[in-house]
Amino acid sequence: MSPGHALVLAAPHRAALDAAGRAARRGGNAVDAALAAAAALTVVYPHQCSLGGDLIALVHTPDGTVRAVLSVGAAARDVDVEALRAADRRMPAQGPQTVTVPGVVAGWAALAEAYGTPGALPAALRDAAALAREGATVSAGLARAIRDRAERITADPGLSALLTGPDDRPLGEGDPLPQPRLADVLDELADDPWSFYRGAISESLAAGLRRLGSPLGAADLAAHRAESAEPLSAELAGTRWWAAPPPSQGAVLPALLSAAADAACLPGPEGTRLLTDRCQDASAARDRLLGDPRGQRLDLEGLLNPAPLAGAEPPKPPFRPSGDTVAVTAVDSSGLAVSLIQSVYQTFGSGLCDPQTGIVLHNRGSAFSLLPGHPGVLRPGARPPHTLCPVIGRSDALLLAAGCQGGRAQPQILAQTLPRLADPAADPVAELERPRWVIGARDIGFEEQTLLAEPGSLTTATDAPPLGLPVVVTAGPTDLAGHTQVVRLGRDGRLDGASDPRADGGAIRHTPGTSPGSGADRRTGASGDAPEATRHDRAHHAPAPTRTTLEGQRP
């Protein structure tokens, strides 16, 4: 391979940074490095992403074109909607009925074909296979997930085999995580990625899904295609922003970025009130209007310009979708940038792992509605409403790619971080360290709509207007405020990036011709090929919150 371009990449795990560094040293570009990181994450982060999940990405090419890659899997064509309605008014949170066609592998293949370097994806998949076969170790985050989901793991033979040691003890932090069957699958995908949908892997996975009680079959897998789509875009304060179109909730992001720009011109309390109000409006619009645009006409204008709630109660999600997502962002000196997000939705997805392949299966189907006439209603072959929300921004001075973990709150988190990150003079590490807040109900652990705030994220002056909903302040940083990954390319060619300190990741900067470990620069959040130079070693748990007096009725 050629020497390649200088690049910077941010990701939430050391193994992903190591994989990206190898891809870069082989001459890979930003997309190659991101795909290598993404493949490694499916091995080391089975609670958050896997070959059995979905993928949405945005890519900015050197000529300035931006495209969305949507690899969102559909419901089975044989799904029995009426039986599910008869059992409950809403979709189950986990289990076989929540498994839709996994889109990750098709998304990787589409990205590699359109933007990658020949041979880079097979090399990345073989690296991931070696990681699975040799046995990665259990991270602190995975260990917490194993403890928190012990009952669900015990209930599923596949998860039990994956996450229990030879002494029948649940795996803990630092324990080996060998996955020989997953390694075999990754090696086969290196030879032919489409085997996942139309080949030996597809046949094995379809049989496993049927045994688990899923209505998905081989024909559903064979029908899947990643979609290359025109992204949504908006020009705000000198920066053009691109977001993924439906079924992604990216459709509400432009309205929140506009509100953030307006809020920045107001005194602190008034600005906070404006942005929190608009976040509630956007959340309600998403829950009422978002669905699969295939086969129906969506109210896109209602998503792009959410109407004020006017006191109406926003819909409540039926469960807390914890675990959620991993984001990988990369940009190289040619102007190629990617924000890639992949996910199993809830922690360990559907709570099912196919024993024959070692693949953890997502529960994206749980986001369907069972209400007739709803745009997100479950129907054969439909894609569910989706939380994944990658973003690309470009001004005369800067190109940036960003993405975050955070479930339904992803647009809220991005609205609080992106405006400052669009300033070329801003330090991305410092910006991601700023305290944040999120609004939600069951999705952040409350029965009523609540604003969950990290200390210092709100103005608490006595003349502050009421925020219109209960406010709960955490004891410190919390995972619920999201794990943001950002990379940037300046007009002067300067590359920088950062990984959220609420996570355990970091950022690497690769310069062709340098050896691993050179060029560390902690304050920009980027390093040579030394992820440890920027890795955040503190693991943040969601601390016990305390309720404040900032409550009031929304007019």
Image (cartoon, rainbow, N blue to C red):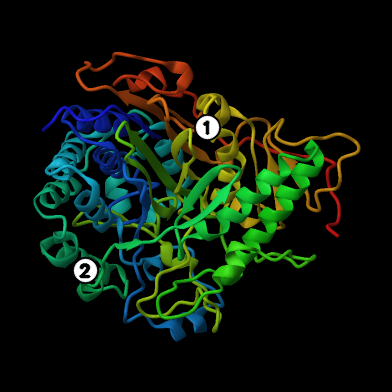
Q: Earlier in the sequence, mark 2 or mark 1?
A: 2
The vertical placement of 408 against 21, above or below, is: below
Residue 210 in the figure: left or right of residue 184: right
* Mark 1 Cα-neighbour bin, 10 Å: few <14, some 14–19, many ≥20: many
* Mark 2 Cα-neighbour bin, 10 Å: few <14, some 14–19, many ≥20: many
Residue 27's disc number:
none
- In three-dimensional space, the C-alpha distance between marks 2 and 1, rounded to whole angstroms, equals 37 Å
In the image, 179 versus 118, the foreground residue is 118
Residue at x 81%, y 40% (from the top left corner) = 269
Residue at x 60%, y 71% (from the top left corner) = 288
Q: Mark 2 belongs to which amino acid?
A: Ala
Q: Position of residue 389 (x, y in %)?
A: 47, 52
Residue at x 44%, y 50% (from the top left corner) = 347
Residue 502's disc number:
1
Q: Position of residue 196 (x, y in %)?
A: 18, 60
Pick the quarter of the image with the C terminus. bottom right
Indicate the secondary structure of the residue bearing disc 2: helix
Pick the quarter of the image with the N terminus. top left
In the image, 535 versus 118, the foreground residue is 118
Residue 177 in the figure: left or right of residue 266: left
Indicate the secondary structure of the residue bearing disc 1: loop
In the image, 502 versus 122, the foreground residue is 122
Judged from this view, the residue extending furthest toward the left is: 191
Q: Mark 1 belongs to which amino acid?
A: Arg
Residue at x 53%, y 24% (from the top left corner) = 427
Q: Position of residue 117 (x, y in %)?
A: 17, 42
Residue 206's disc number:
2
Q: Position of residue 448 (x, y in %)?
A: 72, 57
Q: Report if residue 167 is visible in the image.
A: no
Q: Report if residue 338 is visible in the image.
A: yes
Residue 115 in the figure: left or right of residue 496: left
Camera-nearest label, 2 or 1? 1
